[in-house]
Each structure stands twice: as structure tokens, then as C-alpha cells.
Amino acid sequence: MTAAVQPLRSATERPASPGDADSSALDAIGALARETLGERVTGELRALLVAGRLAPGEKLSLRRVAEALGVSMMPVREAVSRLAADGALEVLPGRAVRVPVLSLAQFRELTRLRLVVEGFAAEEAARQARPADIDRIAAFDAAFRQAASADPPDSAAAVAANRDLHFALYEAAAMPSLIEMIERLWLKAGPILNLDMRHEPRRLEGGSAMQAHARLLEAVRRRDAPAARAALEDDIAAAAAHIEETGQLRA
């Protein structure tokens, strides 16, 4: 009887061996590592945007980002694609990447959304906050006061403490999906909000943010949800009004 003809193998194909299972497992681990790296780069860029470290209109060199983070271009491109999909970055003709410059209408829309979403988060935080959550909020409030009261005000420290205070409050609401929504809003609003605070120390010297934070903290301690929301809304509204007065937004 004639033996069955075996199909021809490609030049790159090799016979199966007991080691193939281990090789497949390693391939899967490699794919996961690349995905995690892309997420890490996204997280780093998101943090810079939320903190106002990247200014509206500022262009990004993908090569410089890759060099600064010690990664290849692939995870950087992946991160830019994700952030562009969220509207936090924009890709220009020629594949240039920059932080969007908000128009007055866009900024006002973001402010209205923040009042609704973050106001709700403040209410839930007042209802749900544990003693440890309140202690964290109080610690960031104290850090903000110290930075804002310095002579001259420490703008960078105040910006960081303000961000940390807000997100400690929102995390106290214990609603992860809500945090994701707020982060997306801060990705767009953060650059102009925090850039203004960095370059306009008088916004800190005025004390409106300190007063709003004090009322907010007291409301959370009392479990007074409506008062917490009102204090947070006053904080957002005062900052937005100041930014509009500076004329930094597109018509």
C-alpha cells in the first residue's frame, strides 16, 4: 500500500514538539506585556493632561515621549490613539499631535457637564465617605492651603493638591464608573484649568478655592450631601468664570 503523501511545510514551519505549548504560553505573555506598556504610556500622558503639565496648543513629539519613558514608538502611538479618541489630544495633518485649544463654547459645555457629574459625585461622597476617606480629603485640603498661602504661592504644589483633593472626594463615592467619567472631563478641561492656576497666582491668593474646599470638607464630615454639592459647584463655577475673564479661550 502506498503511504499517504504528507503536505509540504513552509520554509518557516517546523515540526511540533513538546516545547510548543510552552512557546505559545510565552507568546501570550509577550502580547499582554505590550498591552500593559501601552496602558502605562496612556496613564502617564493622561496624568500630565489632568495636571495641566501639557498646555493647550502644545505640540507633542512622539519620539521625545518614547525617549522620556524609555519605550518604543509603538506604545506611544497606541496611547495617542486612545487619547485622541477621548478628545484629549488631536492629530493634525502630517501626523503632528497637540493638546486641543478649547473654544469658549466647548469650555462652557465642559463646565456644565462638570457641575452635573462632579456635583453628583460630591453628594455621593458625603453619603458614602469613610473616616479614612475624610482624612485623605482633609490632608489634601491642608496641602492646598499651605501651597496657596505661601509667599509667593507655590502654584505647582497647589495644582497637585487641588487635583488630589478633588479625586479623593470622588473616590470616596465608591463608584468606579463615575470616576472614569470625571477623568474624561478632566482630560479636556485639565490643561486650561491648571495652566491658568500655574500662571495666575492671584487666583490662589483670592482664597475662593480655599473657602469652597473648607465648606466642602465640612459638608462631607456632616454627611450633608446638598451642602457638599453646593460647595463643589461654587468651586467649579468660580474657576470657570476666572478663566473666561482671562481671554485664553478661542471665540
Image: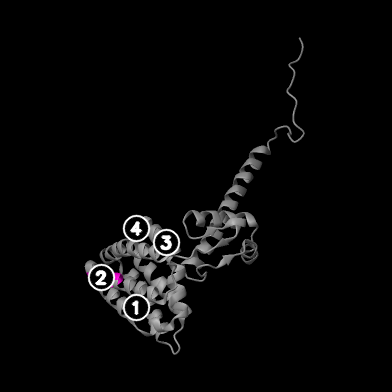
The residues tagged by marks 1 and 4 sit, at their Cα atoms, a distance apart of 25 Å
The residues tagged by marks 2 and 1 sit, at their Cα atoms, a distance apart of 13 Å
The earlier-in-sequence mark between 1 and 3 is: 3
Q: Residue 140's image quarter?
A: bottom left
Q: Can residue 239 be seen?
A: yes
| Residue type beneath disc 4 | Met
Residue visible at 75% across and 36% down in the picture: 12
The earlier-in-sequence mark between 2 and 1 is: 1
Label ID, residue 209 = 1
Q: Residue furthest top?
A: 1
Label 4 Cα crowd, 10 Å radius (few <14 / some 14-19 / many 20+): few
The earlier-in-sequence mark between 4 and 2 is: 4
Tell me: residue 241, above or below residue 188: below
Label ID, residue 175 = 4
Q: Residue furthest bottom?
A: 151
Tell me the SS state at disc 2.
helix
By secondary structure, the bulk of the magenta-drawn segment is best described as: helix
Q: Is residue 144 magenta?
A: no
Q: Which residue is mark 2?
A: 230
